[in-house]
Image: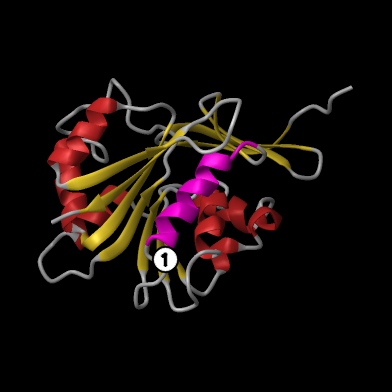
Amino acid sequence: MAQQWQILEKIQTRDGLIELRKRGERDFLIMINGRVLMNSRANRSEIALGERACLAVASRPRPRVLFGGLGMGLTLRAALDCLPANARVVVAELNPIIIAWCRGPLDNLTNMAVDDPRVTIVIDDVASVIAKASQPGAELFDAIIIDLYEGPHSGTDEINDPFYGSRALKTTNDALEQHGVFAVWGENPDTAFEKRLTAAKFSVERQRPGRGGLRHVIYLAEKLT
């Protein structure tokens, strides 16, 4: 008989009800409003997102990387394993409870990635962090990785979406170093998003990691100018 999921903790946030569930020793779910946000056993696209974005910039002098969204820290762990010892990684996370879970029940999944000396965690909207980096004289990022529970899709506001709209993409371009990488997770391909990336002067590579089963999408976009 299959074990039942146990609710370890739940909290109401501005985005809705977030829950951490556990089954057995290493099976975890993070839920938001009854929808699975992250599954500790189904994460190949998230791991590929962190690995492939950071491998693209790992050889740069002291690469600087921004993460939007922490989740279980699995994408962060994958990125750290690809980055040099002198890298600097900023993680923007809105919900302190997510950080607490990554330092508590989820810590063994990532070998305490959140406490790696290369990592700085800020409780902030990643869109705000990107906007600050886009200002004249601000320190730029070599890679910006957006790993949120809802990626670009057909219902995305093409102009005003804070991450995937045309205005946000221009700001992201301005926040990146020359040939910097903008990496995005999505549930499914979104050709309209790809066109907006091209218009914002990014090259676009769409990948669907793994074989068989549900295959999510990752975008690796390189700043051209």
Residue at left offset 39%, top offset 60%: 56
Tell me which corner region of the image, top left, top right, bottom left or bottom right, holds residue 178.
Answer: bottom left
Q: Residue at x 27, y 59 (%)?
A: 180
Q: Residue at x 60, y 25 (%)?
A: 213
**How many numbered dots are placed on residues in this image?**
1
Percent of width and height locating residue 50: 47, 53
Residue 42, position in %: x, y? 62, 36
Prevailing secondary structure class for the magenta stretch in the rendered image: helix
| Quadrant of the image containing the N terminus | top right
Viewer can see residue 56:
yes
Residue drawn at x 46%, y 47% is 49
- The reply to whether the magenta stretch includes residue 179 is no
The quadrant in which residue 169 appears is top left
> Which residue in the rendered view is the most extreme toward the right?
1
Q: Position of residue 67 (x, y in %)?
A: 40, 54
As drawn, is 110 to the left or to the right of 119?
right
User: Start and end of the magenta stretch?
Assistant: 42-56
Going by the numbered disc 1, the residue's amino acid type is: Val
Work out whether residue 122 can be spotted: no
Say if 53 sits above or below 8 in the image: below
Q: Secondary structure at mark 1?
A: strand
The outermost residue toward the left is: 136
Count neighbours of disc 1 (C-alpha within 10 A) and say few if under 14, some if 14 to 19, many if 20 or more.
many
Q: What residue does disc 1 label?
A: 89
The colour mode here is: secondary structure
Query: Could you tell me which quadrant the C terminus lies in?
Result: bottom left
Residue 170 at x, y percent in the picture:
14, 47
29 with respect to 154 (left or right): right
Figure check: 179 above or below 221: below
In the image, taking residue 166 as reference, residue 1 lies left or right, namely: right
The answer to which of 141 and 98 lies nearer the viewer is 141
